[in-house]
C-alpha cells in the first residue's frame, strides 16, 4: 500500500520537523506532502531541508499566502491525484494534536473502507488537554452538524482521515467549497452521498504544545453556516448512494 500524508502549514517551523520525521518513521513508510501558505517564519525552508535529507519521500507545495485550511487540502489532494503514485491519502495536523502513531490504526481499517476517520467521539476516543468550554463547543458542534445532515458519524469536524484515492477522484475535490471545520464536515458528508464506506476509529486528540492555534471565532461561525449550505446545495460531483460501487448492499452504508 502506497501512502501519502498531506499536512497544511502556516508558521509551523517549530513543529514541522518533528511531525515529518515521526510520519516517515511509521512502518507503512508514508511519503509526506507539506502544503505551506507562505509562512514568514521559515517553515518552507525547513521542509526543503527535510526533502534534501529524505529524497523522494518529502514534497513541498508552496502557496502565495494564507488561503485557508480547506483550500490547502484541495490543493494537496489535487497534486496527489495528478501524481498517481499513492493508494491512500492521509490528512492530518502538524501541531501534534494528531499522533503520527495513529496513522497505523487508520490504515488498519482501510481495506474494508473508502474513508477512515480518526474519531474523538467513538468509544475509546478522547480529547486531552482541552478546557471544558472548548470540549463542550466541539461536542455540541458535532451534534448540531450530525443532526442537520442526518447521519451517524460521531466526529464530523475531525481532521484526521485516511482516503482511498479512487474515492477522492470520484468526489472531484475541486468542488469542495467550505473552509476550516466546515471543510471537514463537507468532505465526509460528500463521501457519504457518494456511497462511500466510512468508518471511525478512536484516537486521542491533544492540544498543541508549541506555536499558536489557528482556531478563531470566524472559523467556528463559518462551520455553523456551512452545515446548512452543505445540506441544501448538494455537490454536483456527489454520486447517489448505491451507484458508486457494485457489491453487497451494506457496502455503501455509513458505519457508526
Image (cartoon, grey):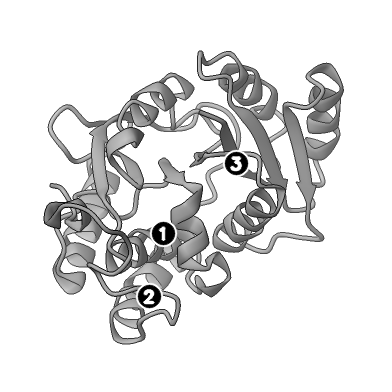
Query: Which label was assigned to residue 226?
Result: 2
Report, in whole angstroms, how far the alpha carbon at label 3 lies from the one at label 1: 15 Å
**Looking at the image, is mark 2 or mark 3 nearer the viewer?**
3
Rendered position, 31 above or below 8? above
Report, in whole angstroms, how far the alpha carbon at label 2 lies from the one at label 3: 23 Å
Tell me the residue at 32%/72% (across/down).
Answer: 224
Q: Position of residue 194 (x, y in %)?
A: 33, 67
Q: Position of residue 193 (x, y in %)?
A: 29, 69
Image quadrant where residue 228 sits: bottom left
**Looking at the image, is mark 3 or mark 1 nearer the viewer?**
3
Q: Nearer the viewer, residue 184 or 114?
A: 114
Q: Secondary structure at mark 3?
A: strand
Q: Position of residue 85 (x, y in %)?
A: 65, 40
Tell me the residue at 78%/31% (across/down).
Answer: 47
Q: Earlier in the sequence, mark 3 or mark 1?
A: 3
Note whether residue 86 is visible. yes
Report, in whole angstroms, how far the alpha carbon at label 1 lies from the one at label 2: 9 Å
Q: Position of residue 7 (x, y in %)?
A: 60, 41
| Residue corresponding to mark 1 | 181
Q: Secondary structure at mark 1?
A: helix
Q: Nearer the viewer, residue 79 or 145?
A: 79
How busy is the neighbourhood of tag 1: few (under 14 within 10 Å), some, or many (20 plus)? Answer: many
Query: Which label was assigned to residue 7?
Result: 3
Amino acid at each position: 500500500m502506497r501512502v501519502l500524508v498531506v499536512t497544511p502549514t502556516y508558521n509551523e517551523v517549530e513543529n514541522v520537523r518533528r511531525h515529518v520525521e515521526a510520519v516517515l518513521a511509521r512502518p507503512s513508510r508514508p511519503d509526506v506532502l507539506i502544503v505551506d501558505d507562505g509562512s514568514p517564519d521559515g517553515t518552507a525552508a525547513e521542509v526543503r531541508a527535510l526533502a534534501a535529507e529524505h529524497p523522494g519521500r518529502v514534497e513541498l507545495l508552496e502557496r502565495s499566502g494564507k488561503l485557508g485550511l480547506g483550500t490547502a487540502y484541495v490543493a494537496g489532494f489535487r497534486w496527489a491525484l495528478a501524481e498517481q503514485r499513492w493508494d491512500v491519502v492521509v490528512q492530518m495536523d502538524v501541531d501534534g494534536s494528531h499522533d503520527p502513531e495513529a496513522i497505523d490504526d487508520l490504515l488498519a481499517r482501510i481495506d474494508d473502507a473508502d474513508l477512515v476517520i480518526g474519531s474523538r467521539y467513538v468509544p475509546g476516543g478522547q480529547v486531552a488537554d482541552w478546557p471544558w468550554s472548548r470540549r463542550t463547543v466541539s461536542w455540541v458542534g458535532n451534534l448540531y452538524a450530525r443532526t442537520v445532515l442526518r447521519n451517524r458519524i460521531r466526529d464530523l469536524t475531525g481532521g484526521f482521515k485516511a482516503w482511498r484515492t479512487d474515492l477522492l477522484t470520484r468526489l472531484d475535490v475541486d468542488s469542495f467549497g467550505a473552509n476550516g471545520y466546515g471543510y471537514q464536515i463537507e468532505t465526509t458528508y460528500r463521501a457519504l452521498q457518494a456511497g462511500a464506506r466510512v468508518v471511525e476509529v478512536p484516537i486521542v486528540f491533544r492540544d498543541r504544545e508549541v506555536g499558536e492555534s489557528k482556531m478563531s471565532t470566524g472559523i467556528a461561525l463559518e462551520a455553523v453556516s456551512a452545515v446548512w449550505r452543505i445540506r441544501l446545495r448538494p455537490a454536483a460531483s456527489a454520486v447517489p448512494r448505491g451507484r458508486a460501487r457494485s457489491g453487497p448492499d451494506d457496502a455503501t452504508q455509513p458505519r457508526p
